[in-house]
Image (cartoon, helix red, strand yellow):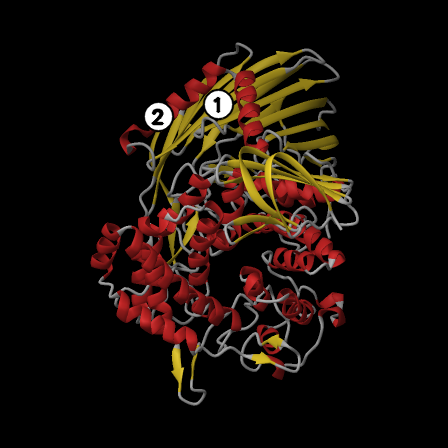
Amino acid sequence: MNQFIKTDPWMLVEERFDPARVKSAESLFALGNGVMGGRANFEEHYSGESLQGNYIGAIYYPDKTRVGWWKNGYPEYFAKVLNSAFWIGVDVFVDGEALDLAAVEVESFRREMDMRRSVLTRRMTVRMKSGLRVEVEAVRFLSLERRELGVIRYAVRPLDRAAEVTFSPYIDADVRNTDANYDEKFWEPVATDGDAVQSRTKKSGFDVAWAQRVFLDGAGFRCETVPEKVRHTAVVRREAGEWATLCKYVGICSSLNHKADGLIAAARAVAADGAEAGFDALLKEQERAWAARWHSCDIEIGGDDAAQQGIRFCIFMLLQTYTGVDTRLNIGPKGFTGEKYGGVTYWDTEAYCLPFYMATAGRQVARELLVYRYNQLDKAIENAAKLGFRDGAALYPMVTINGEECHNEWEITFEEIHRNGAIAYAIFNYIRYTGDTSYLAEGGAEVLLSIARFWARRITWSEARKKYVMLGVTGPNEYENNVNNNWYTSYIACWCLRYAAEAVKWVRENNPEAYAAMCARRAFDEQAETAVWLEIDRNMFFGEDRDLGIFLQQDGYLDKEQLLVKDLDPAERPINQKWSWDRILRSCFIKQADVLQGLYFFQEDFDDATLRRNFDFYEARTVHESSLSPCVHAILAAKLGLMDKAYEMYLRTSRLDLDDYNREVEEGCHVTSMAGSWLSVVEGFGGMRVRDGLLSFEPHLPEAWRHLAFRIDYRGRVISVRIMRGTVEITCEGEAIEIMLAGERLTVDGTVSRNLK
């Protein structure tokens, strides 16, 4: 671990300036409002090492794929989230000397992120080279209510004597991505005009404009412009102990929401409206908006501040990343905290993120995530056709921003096809939780039948086994490539075939008009195609070892030398940084839940003894070098009563970035896996499931916790759960509801309390 953030239930606090930790802090203190965000770069010039990053959702560049050997079917590009204009810039000079933390003596430094309201504050005292001591306070936020507005208040005061303070707030659109395949600049200038600048992305053709309004205690500014950069400069004199305070309001508008020829005017209007409201009013507005968000999703853990801070940090980052206001947006693995993974959509959204938004933001927001994939169905069909699967089969991409596959590692692009299963499972999971079966007729069944067509064509009949088999795949454990009969992929494929057959039947029986339109649009012959699907399901091969009582991750897994993670030399960890790829592939070590991913999704299909045998076997061989791994293990461990392991895995997932377990937080935070942290609390320790249409809880309280409390939105009701040592209390706001609690069926109308064994 590499912890430097103070433990606090509601705050992230950094109490010392350390140049070696600047990039890590930039990730952890990042800001977002669901449509844009950015790393916690310093407003003033910093000549030390930094990773500059400001990002706008759905604005991307198709960076031409760079591979050593081109293979048929490779995507033409990898979609890159763009480092956009540096809008936060405020150069500061004191008696003509630049304020630069890499060049001055830092006497005190404190940076705070108030997660209750998404406000970043930095306070510091520095000694300039002249010997003058200067105090600085910078406050910044992205408005949750006014989603195109950024706000900064930057205050400076000399401490020892009077001094001349120069503020030079600017917007710099001459920026580059650190991650660029050919070191290209992704933006080209459109216009620079007084207080505003407009740029356009090359190839993808998105326009964005930034405009600033600045105020400094009545001082006048002179304006300077050069191509792609606007700057305002003002000079004031302050006595010792007297503050000089700059307020900066920036409008950020894109062609996603405005006409390109009106962008500068739109950005100016946003900045002007913000300035008219004023900093204090905007801050109060921000507090109210965030209080409303937290009301529906906060988790309270008593007696364990590290665990409390961990889960609130995860929820906070998820709230900053996605709000469901735009179906063109989704949840990138790094959110708005960094460039890695391109900032685009992975199967993480359906497998991990959907349940969080479904239970905390409501049915409509969750539905938007499904609609996002429905809108890309034709692209998924094109993706499958590129691999030779035609006649309407759909292969959803492993990585995408607009529906096209843009991942260029063959073992992922062509073989990690289990992602199709996650898309289908999300539809099932959504309907199971919300009861919104109408979605099947409004797009869900169409997605499912197209996915089922893919599986029916991808699965092979083995004459030798007299069974259907799944050849040449990569399961969730990416430390295995091109394997046969990966248990998880085969299991979820067969489940998809059954569920698709059920879904199209439901649409036929309940919405004949939608059924007829779907059949015509997709040239679907239900009787002929579903007969094939169910035949495959009845005769699929699944590997298992009867002596060990486990499902085989894939053919030949037990041929590997069966070492355990506990026997690894810590100096060899993480193995993805210390070992050759050949050595990893030949080892038995597992990157993330694979068989256990399937057992997590389909727990009701297996008894606890089966779950326990597989958990004990595979967890001991899992190195958890994927951020998506610990949460699945935490949930299953809690279900099986392995509370020490569940707690260990919970801390690992919730504090993955805060404690920098993987030694890579400087690249950005693991945002999508943070939804898994929420799952590990609500589904793990809270034991929440939906079974046979009933909301169910099987609570488990870790030894270190005095209590656990959380809220969920369930079918128009707000359900509050409070688990204490020996008791659980459940409150229903809204219409009375029947639930299962620790195996007992009961009606909740108001509040009920039960003793736990």
Q: Residue at x 45, y 44 (%)?
A: 366
Residue 590, can we see it? yes
Q: Amino acid at mark 2?
A: Ala
Residue 250's place in the image compared with 591, above or below, is: above
> Circle 1 is placed at which residue position?
249
- Cβ atoms at labels 1 and 2 below 8 Å apart: no
In this rendering, would 202 be left or right of 617?
A: left
Spot occupied by residue 639 in the image (x, y as percentages of width and height): 66, 58
Q: How many marks?
A: 2
Q: Earlier in the sequence, mark 1 or mark 2?
A: 1
Rendered location of residue 442, percent (x, y) = 32, 48
Q: Which amino acid type is shown beneath numbered disc 1?
A: Tyr
Instruction: Residue at 52% x, 69% y: name it.
Output: 488
Q: Position of residue 473 (x, y in %)?
A: 46, 73
Give the image quarter of residue 499.
bottom left
Q: SS of the residue at dot 2?
A: helix
What residue is shown with label 2? 266
- The residue lying toward the viewer, choosing from 506 and 475, is 506
Name the spot of residue 673 as percent of width and height, x first. 57, 51
Relative depth, front residue between 319 and 279: 319
648 horizontally vs 445: left or right: right
Q: Residues within 10 Å of mark 2 (few under 14, many from 20)?
A: many
57 or 80, which lies in front? Answer: 57
Residue 236 sits in quarter:
top right
- Within 10 Å of the Cα at label 1, are there few (<14), some (14-19), or many (20+) other Cα atoms? many
Which mark identifies residue 11?
none
Image height of 192 relative to 623, above or below: above
Mark pair 1, 2: CA separation = 14 Å
Above or below, 528 relative to 548: above
Residue 45 at least partly seen: no
